[in-house]
Image (spheres, rainbow, N blue to C red):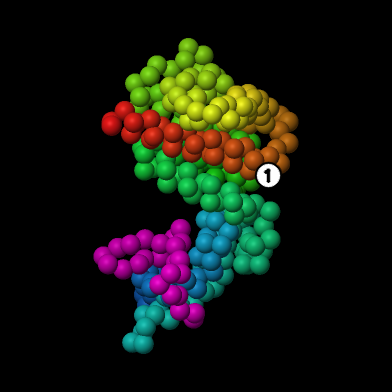
Amino acid sequence: MEQPTETDSIECHLQKVGMGTLICSAARHGDRTTSEVDPTICFNCPAGKVYREFGCDAVLPRLRFFPTSAGVLTRFEGLFCKIRKRDTTLEECEACELVSAETTKRIITTARGLFQADAFYSAYQDIEGARKALRDGNFENAVTRSVSCLESVMRVVHEKLSEPLPSKKQLTDLWKSTRSVLHFERLDETGSTLALLNSLSGVMTHLGGVRNALGDAHGKGTTKADVSASIAELVLNIATTVGTMIVRRFNQVKSEKND
């Protein structure tokens, strides 16, 4: 097996750390097998490669680890996709239409880290739900959870600053109030970004409209909404990017108050 370098990622959704060693939660147990693994095994595991390269945690491997005097003998027996409920391969995962764009994965990863670090836990849960819904092809729910993430960010900002929420709690009203309490107009003394900030009001209106028309926040009828993967991913990217911007501005305002 190929040996990883110190800078190679071996991250995998199936990894656990226990008693000073790596544990694979997917390892098949038996009288002569173990669930303990090492960086080389994780680096070469096809399920780990799918997770690192495509950001998908819906693939489960069938594998066994046999401890020997020379090390651990690894036997990979196949990959199973939880979404499609059938065996798959690395090549099929690469061509899967449910694979998110690399830029989307980076935006989500950055936002999740920021939400978690700054205790925006409801926003973190919403963005994680949106990510999984997009991964699973549940595009209606991806739209709903994405917009909910943005709402959660703005609600938490008000709570942390001890500011009252607006009487109307629509997305546009939350944005208008958030913009005020975070003093966005002070970001640029030249006023060159004012038009950009004003355009976000239209974005909020349209995001709310898309959620009402294509999301599942208000239940489902007999006719399923025709939501494409590209629209769901667009809504997720917009909501996450704006939410990230709001949290960063919140941290700046909080820091200025403490000085």
Residue 215 appears in view? yes
Q: Is 215 on the left or on the right of 131, as rendered? A: right
User: In the rendering, at what x and y percent does residue 195 appear?
Assistant: 62, 27
Residue drawn at the location 71% of the way across and 29% of the way down = 222
User: In the rendering, at what x and y percent does residue 66 appear?
Assistant: 40, 79
As for residue 162 lying within the magenta part, the answer is no
Farthest residue toward the top?
167
User: In the rendering, at what x and y percent does residue 257 appear?
Assistant: 31, 28
Residue numbers of the magenta segment: 1-25
Q: Nearer the viewer, residue 65 or 43?
A: 43
Farthest residue toward the left?
19
Residue drawn at the location 28% of the way across and 31% of the way down = 258
Residue position marked by numbered label 1 in the rendering: 229
User: In the rendering, at what x and y percent does residue 93 appear?
Assistant: 63, 61
The amino acid on which the numbered mark 1 sits, given as a three-letter code, is Ala
From what the image shows, is residue 72 above or below residue 50?
below
Q: Nearer the viewer, residue 86 or 21?
A: 21
Residue 220 appears in view? no
| Picture mark count | 1
Residue drawn at the location 55% of the way across and 27% of the way down = 191
From what the image shows, is residue 243 above or below residue 113?
above
